């Protein structure tokens, strides 16, 4: 099972593996664990490059649209102050 967790600097990806039920499964996981971690690290490096290229491609020549005009262009309710919430 995997889970994406947003953070202020990006996203964490959690992989969850169930606890082995047999001693032989535990030994296999202990042997395979370092190899699996290395594969994940290599995959993340590739993903960083590909994601950066996609972002650059998306933003290349991009022009931000104009902000929409206010809906009360006639000035209706313009004199009403904004609501302030006090906790």
Image (cartoon, rainbow, N blue to C red):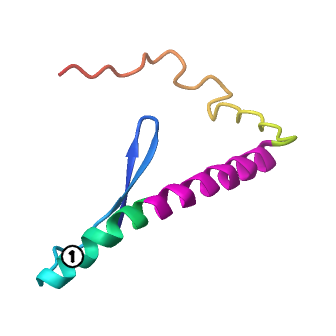
Q: Is residue 2 magenta?
A: no
**20 lies above or below 55:** below
Instruction: Please give left or right for residue 21 compared with residue 53 in the image.
Output: left
Check the picture and name the quadrant holding the N terminus.
bottom left
Determine the residue positioned at 16% across, 73% down. 19
**9 lies above or below 86:** below
Check the picture and name the quadrant holding the C terminus.
top left
Instruction: Please give left or right for residue 67 compared with residue 85 in the image.
Output: right
* Most foreground residue, 86 or 60: 60
Task: List the residue tagged with mark 1.
Answer: 27
- Mark 1 lies on a secondary structure that is helix
Q: Tell me if mark 1 has few (under 14), some (14-19) or many (20+) residues whose alpha carbon lies within 10 angstroms of its own.
A: few
* Most foreground residue, 38 or 49: 38
Secondary structure mostly seen in magenta is helix
State the image coordinates of residue 31 (x, y, percent, origin top left). 30, 71
Q: Is residue 48 magenta?
A: yes
State the image coordinates of residue 63 (x, y, percent, origin top left). 83, 38
**Extent of the magenta region:** 38-59
State the image coordinates of residue 21 (x, y, percent, origin top left). 12, 82
Determine the residue positioned at 25% across, 69% down. 30
Count the labels in the image.
Answer: 1
Instruction: Please give left or right for residue 18 compared with residue 76 in the image.
Output: left
**27 lies above or below 52:** below
* Most foreground residue, 24 or 84: 24
């Amino acid at each position: 099972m995997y889970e994406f967790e947003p953070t202020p600097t990006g996203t964490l990806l959690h992989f969850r593996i169930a606890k082995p039920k047999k001693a032989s499964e535990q030994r296999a996981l202990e042997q395979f664990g370092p190899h699996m971690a290395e594969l994940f690290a290599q995959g993340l490096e590739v993903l960083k490059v590909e994601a950066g290229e996609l972002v650059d491609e998306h933003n290349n020549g991009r022009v931000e649209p104009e902000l929409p005009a206010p809906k009360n262009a006639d000035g209706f309710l313009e004199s009403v102050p904004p609501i302030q919430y006090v906790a």
